[in-house]
């Protein structure tokens, strides 16, 4: 049994345990397959430097695919709320800046790292399960940063197409049947929203 096989088994066990403990706060009961990860990384360009953001990095399956594909001078910031998931992602993908944080703090997190513009976003967030106000705020922050594309994974093919159309002018769905469970990627372009202005008292 290879070291990678042992790692994969441990990764799947960790995912299942977290899913049983936290339910819909974890997007799936298993990490994304290499097929789903590859589909999510279509917009990662190996020919030019990019500033990439990953949301809901989990244990790093998509992070690994992005890091392997991206230009040597690209920057990848991977955000994960669960410290156990984040530790595994950081260990397996040293090229990524893995940050333990909640997407509710996304704007401050990007400001602290000097990110005023993004070239693309990879998302493993359980977006439909987020509170509506938080979901709108996340997409607004991304729109502020001018990210030309967002690739969002799902394990419920086509079900939430209308949701992403609310936030983006163009949405293409790419099914990925070779995943457990079968899923796909919403490739989204042209954000419709901008973050609301912060109004201070007085």
Image (spheres, rainbow, N blue to C red):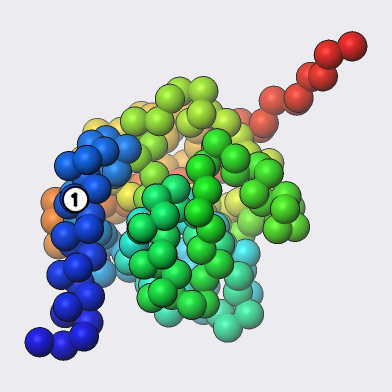
Residue 108, position as x, y percentages in the image = 68, 44
Identify the residue shown where x is 23% and y is 36%: 23
- Picture quarter containing residue 138? top right
Q: Quadrant of residue 119?
A: bottom right
Residue 180: where, in percent of width, then height? 14, 56
Q: Residue furthest right?
A: 202
Viewer-closest of 199 and 157 = 199
Q: Is residue 87 positioned above or below 93 on the image?
A: above
- Classify 177 as above or below 4: above
Q: Residue at x 89, y 11 (%)?
A: 202
- Judging depth in this view, the residue of 133 and 187 nearest the camera is 133
Q: Nearer the viewer, residue 102 or 140?
A: 102
Residue furthest left in the image: 1
Looking at the image, is 111 positioned above or below residue 14?
A: above
Q: Residues within 10 Å of mark 1 (few under 14, many from 20)?
A: few
From the top left corner, tell me how far across and down residue 86 is, in percent: 42, 60
Regarding residue 179, the answer to whether it shows in the image is no
Residue at figure coordinates x 22%, y 40% from the top left:
21
From the viewer's perspective, is 156 left or right of 186?
left
Q: Is residue 165 among the parts visible in the rendering?
A: yes
Q: Quadrant of the N terminus?
A: bottom left
Q: Residue at x 22, y 58 (%)?
A: 14
Question: Disc 1 on helix, strand or loop?
Answer: helix
Q: Residue furthest top?
A: 202
Q: Which residue is mark 1?
A: 17
Count of numbered tags: 1
Q: Is residue 59 left or right of residue 169?
A: left
Place of residue 74 in the rendered image (x, y in percent of width and height, measured from the top left)? 60, 74
């Amino acid at each position: 049994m290879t070291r990678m096989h042992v790692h994969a088994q441990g990764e799947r066990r960790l995912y299942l345990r977290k899913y049983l403990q936290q339910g819909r706060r974890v997007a799936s009961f298993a990490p994304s397959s290499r097929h789903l990860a590859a589909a999510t990384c279509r917009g990662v360009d190996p020919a030019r430097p990019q500033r990439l953001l990953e949301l809901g990095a989990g244990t790093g399956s998509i992070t690994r695919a992005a890091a392997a594909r991206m230009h040597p001078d690209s920057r990848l910031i991977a955000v994960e709320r669960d410290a156990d998931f984040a530790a595994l992602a950081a260990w397996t993908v040293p090229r990524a800046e893995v940050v333990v944080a909640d997407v509710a703090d996304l704007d401050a997190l990007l400001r602290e790292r000097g990110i005023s513009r993004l070239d693309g976003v990879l998302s493993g967030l359980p977006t439909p399960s987020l509170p509506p106000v938080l979901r709108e705020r996340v997409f607004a922050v991304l729109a502020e940063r001018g990210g030309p594309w967002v690739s969002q994974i799902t394990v419920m093919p086509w079900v939430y197409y209308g949701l992403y159309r609310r936030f983006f002018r163009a949405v293409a769905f790419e099914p990925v049947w070779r995943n457990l469970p079968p899923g796909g990627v919403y490739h989204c372009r042209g954000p419709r929203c901008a973050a609301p202005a912060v109004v201070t008292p007085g």
